[in-house]
DNA sequence: TTGAAATTCAAACGATGGTTTGAAAATGAG
DNA sequence: CTCATTTTCAAACCATCGTTTGAATTTCAA
């Protein structure tokens, strides 16, 4: 059974996630959230102990969903050639380019955090970023088996960052004078292209 | 002679630049600005016609300084080998890693804009981004002389984005569990490393 | 020195922010 | 059904926000 309190909680979370992603923490008012969620003004304080508490909850949920989604397909990469695995990893990173889905909403919330990290985010990152970093490191190690720890780490970060420009500036890039519109087909093409460059850079055989 | 109005204007600009970079537009109040600048409350409205006008001014100044700084050294790149030029370009991009200087403050203001671009920024970008993109495109073209327009453009964007992860997440990366602290020497090392990967990816000879 | 223009200032304004309140309504175990 | 608990609600509260006001002060050409 879904207790009535659960449905308003869920409504608030959903509305808040969208608004936080769109306008950031400072940019969204609790009044905007309760209006979008069609709940009472005081509901946020009752259920989440204030705007801060709600944001913390939204952030945790986004983080969990995001890492789960990436790690879920981690084992598949092990079965591929290193070149295939790397291209697949990149393709998955580029996925938010295709649609304004839940996934890309979570990414947006994270983007706000990279500009000015909240303490919640900092701890979340230091506690749970390891598996994701590890995934990238595993991919890189197959190309640089003899690299020292520091180089390997930098390479992992570098790999993670390969798609960021395209993700972060999607809207700007779509407009003149660039005009780079990316549909489903184009994502595959883009992943291939970036994949080839990354593989070449790491000394693979594209 | 420096008119008295000029010094308060300058004080406001300076304080505002720092605060906007640190906390973003929504996160900084005009009261915080006037306190930091040690000017009267109404000064912002008198000199800049409101918070919006001040922000516009700060943004324009940051943009101008940033592009000038890159384009000023553009011609030097032409005299180098393509590999040298590309590494130098990357080193220059990594420059803000070294110190909390004016340059990195401008970068931060831009980072806020990439999350949620203001109309001012949009127009600024569409009007004046061309030369900077062109610089990147020139570098890339020396490696991909036969690439079509679309590929060349994507490659240019890709090149510009190579250093973003390190710049944007500097604070986080410096902390555990990564612990990537970057001093002046390390920037050179990092530029070499990234340079080699990019060159390799574009089919050069690292 | 004079006087009009430019600039500074303290105070207040209206709007919006997050949060609190106390009562009303809904819920569900006994 | 009963009644204690949980949940919703409209209204108000208080702080902060960006901006305005009108007078005081400073500036500088005449």
Image (cartoon, coloured by chain):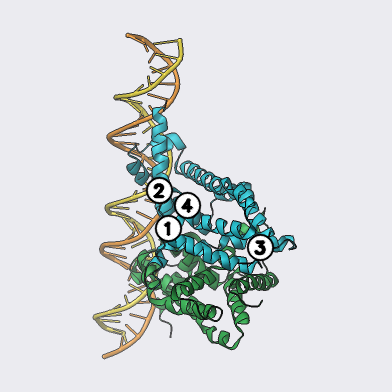
Chain colours: A green, B cyan, C orange, D yellow
Inspect this view and state whether residue B170 appears: yes
Find residue A109 and report its horizontal and vertical position in percent.
Answer: 47, 66
Along the polypeptide, which appears first: circle 1 or circle 2? 2
Q: Quadrant of residue A191?
A: bottom right
What residue sits 46% from the left and 60% below the top?
Answer: B187
Q: Residues within 10 Å of mark 3 (few under 14, many from 20)?
A: some
Q: Earlier in the sequence, mark 4 or mark 3?
A: 4
What is the spatial separation of the Cα atoms under label 1 and label 2, in whole angstroms? 23 Å
- Going from N to C along the chain, the mark reached first, 4 or 1, is 4
Position of B49 compared to D12: left or right? right
Residue for point 40% across, 63% down = B171
Residue situated in front as seen by the camera: A115 or A27: A115
Looking at the rendered structure, which numbered label has been put on residue B184?
1
Say which mark, if any, is on residue B18: 2
**In front: A1, or A66?**
A66
Q: Position of residue B121 (x, y in %)?
A: 55, 49
**Callout 4: 10 Å neighbours few (<14), some, many (20+)?**
many
Counting the numbered discs, the total is 4
Q: Which residue is mark 3?
A: B154
The answer to whether residue B194 is above or below residue D11 is below
- Residue under label 4, please give it: B109
**Label 2: how many Cα within 10 Å (few below 14, some 14–19, many 20+):** many
Which is closer to the viewer, label 1 or label 2? Answer: 1
Quarter of the image where one finds residue A200 = bottom right
Foreground tag (3 vs 1): 1
Q: Are marks 4 and 1 on the same chain?
A: yes
The chain under label 3 reads B
């Amino acid at each position: 059974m879904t207790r009535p309190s659960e449905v308003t909680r869920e409504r608030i979370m959903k509305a808040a996630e969208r608004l936080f992603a769109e306008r950031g923490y400072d940019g969204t008012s609790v009044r905007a959230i309760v209006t979008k969620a069609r709940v009472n003004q005081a509901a946020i304080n009752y259920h989440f102990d204030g705007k801060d508490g709600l944001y913390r909850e939204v952030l945790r949920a986004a983080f969990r969903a995001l890492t789960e989604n990436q790690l879920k397909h981690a084992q598949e990469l092990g079965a591929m050639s290193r070149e295939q695995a790397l291209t697949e990893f990149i393709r998955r990173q580029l996925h938010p380019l295709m649609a304004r889905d839940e996934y890309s909403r979570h990414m947006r919330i994270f983007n706000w955090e990279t500009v000015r990290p909240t303490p919640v985010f900092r701890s979340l990152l230091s506690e749970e970023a390891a598996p994701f970093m590890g995934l990238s490191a595993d991919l890189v190690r197959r190309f640089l088996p003899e690299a020292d720890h520091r180089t390997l780490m930098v390479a992992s970060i570098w790999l993670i960052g390969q798609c960021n420009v395209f993700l972060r500036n999607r809207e700007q890039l779509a407009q003149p004078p660039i005009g780079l519109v990316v549909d489903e087909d184009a994502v595959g093409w883009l992943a291939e292209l970036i994949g080839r460059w990354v593989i070449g850079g790491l000394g693979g055989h594209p």
